[in-house]
Amino acid sequence: MGHVDISTALQRIAAIVGPSGVVAPADAAGLLVDERQLFSGAAALIVRPASVEQCAQVIRTCHEAGLGVVPQGGNTGYCGGATPFDAQRQILLSMARMNHVREIDPIGFTMTAEAGVVLAKAQTAAREQELLFPLSMGSEGSCQLGEVLSTNAGGLAVLRYGTARDLVLGLEVVLPNGDVLSELKGLRKDNTGYDLKALFLGAEGTLGVITAVVLKLFPEPRVRQTAWVAVASVDAACRLLSRARRESGDQVVSAEYISRRSLELVLAHVRGARDPLDSAAPHYVLLELASADEEGVLRDRLERIFSRCTRCRRGRRRRDRGLR
Ligand SMILES: Cc1cc2nc3c(=O)[nH]c(=O)nc-3n(C[C@H](O)[C@H](O)[C@H](O)COP(=O)(O)OP(=O)(O)OC[C@H]3O[C@@H](n4cnc5c(N)ncnc54)[C@H](O)[C@@H]3O)c2cc1C
């Protein structure tokens, strides 16, 4: 139990963020239900701080009054983690107003941005400098940077670039007592002491609220080649991926395994969908390669990978029949 009473604390919090930082009950409905509409909740107050200072003061006041804080980004999470459930003892802290890209360093390949920047906006900001922020997923038009780090989101390009955790160089976090931990550094070869920021990645706000980040950027690939490949078994799909990584010099950006059964569900339920190949196969792989090469070079490389796979298969068959 805190030493400030709750109604005083709520008044203080409203004053800290000002009228434009308090969400009116009429606008709150969408924030109190999760993406899949499995959880609906309630909060004593919903606020949108506009700066790390406001965020810290709000959290310090909650700490003094024993109020719970539920941070929320784009509210696209699948586990109900961003839905508050106590109308008396919890506030909802929306990061939506902390939405500025502070700096892009095209020499050091970094971006410094506030936690409420929508993922698609970060991707666009990088692209404008001919750089790539590779985290990409279906919710990228709504989900926000602080939260993709808090959930350690994976997305489509994990094979090449890792999960959100692997894309972070620095963090700014407000701790549960309102102190600010500022580690907004972009140094890649930082081998000093403990990696404190790692504690907050994937922690879903349990250890603090992320307010800003320094992210790794990469050269933007000039060309992409995508292939839909039929394979005989799951094992063959894994071997194809391994071969593609080796033969391309690790230019595989994404690889998705799709069973015939799941393709049939798509064909049955998605209007306009058609089978990509003339005949059915039990398993498929959707493979994407990206590089800074010319288009023809990457296409040739992809075709060479497949032709070697075919040659291997032929070779193995001949061996099986005792022809070699
Ligand atoms: C169509 C679709 C596709 C998706 N695809 C993927 C995918 O490919 N890979 C994947 O991993 N996920 C995927 N997701 C899930 C979801 O988008 C991610 O988990 C995303 O990271 C959630 O971001 P958000 O801004 O919506 O967070 P929210 O749902 O708002 O919050 C998620 C969690 O983080 C906490 N949190 C929010 N803000 C902060 C903060 N600033 N500091 C600390 N904690 C905070 C919240 O309390 C909550 O526990 C997908 C979702 C949808 C709807």
Image: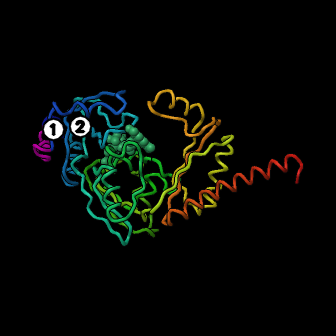
Provide residue 257's location: percent of width, then percent of height. 57, 42
Q: Residues at badges 1 and 2 in contact (C-beta under 8 Å)?
A: yes
Q: Quadrant of the N terminus?
A: top left
Q: SS of the residue at dot 2?
A: strand
Q: Is residue 233 above or below residue 181?
A: above
Q: Which residue is mark 1?
A: 10
What distance separates the C-alpha of mark 1 from that of mark 2? 9 Å
Q: Residue at x 43, y 47 (%)?
A: 153
Residue 49 x %, y %: 19, 48
The magenta-colored residue range is 8-20
Which residue is labeled 2 in the image?
A: 91
Dot 1 or dot 2, earlier in sequence: 1
Tell me the amino acid under the disc marked 2: Ile
* Ligand 1 sits in quadrant: top left
Measured from the top left, where is residue 222 in percent x and y?
A: 44, 63
Which quarter shows the C terminus? bottom right
Q: Nearer the viewer, residue 73 or 47?
A: 73
* Residue 208 seen by the camera: no
> Does ligand 1 reach within 8 Å of label 1's beta carbon?
no
Overall secondary structure of the magenta section: helix
Crowd around label 2: few <14 · some 14–19 · many ≥20 (10 Å):
many
Q: Quadrant of residue 232?
A: top right
Q: Amino acid at mark 1?
A: Leu
Q: Quadrant of residue 48?
A: top left
Q: Is residue 95 above or below residue 109?
A: above
Magenta segment includes 189: no
Residue depicted at x 31% and y 59%: 125
Q: Is residue 68 left or right of residue 201?
A: left
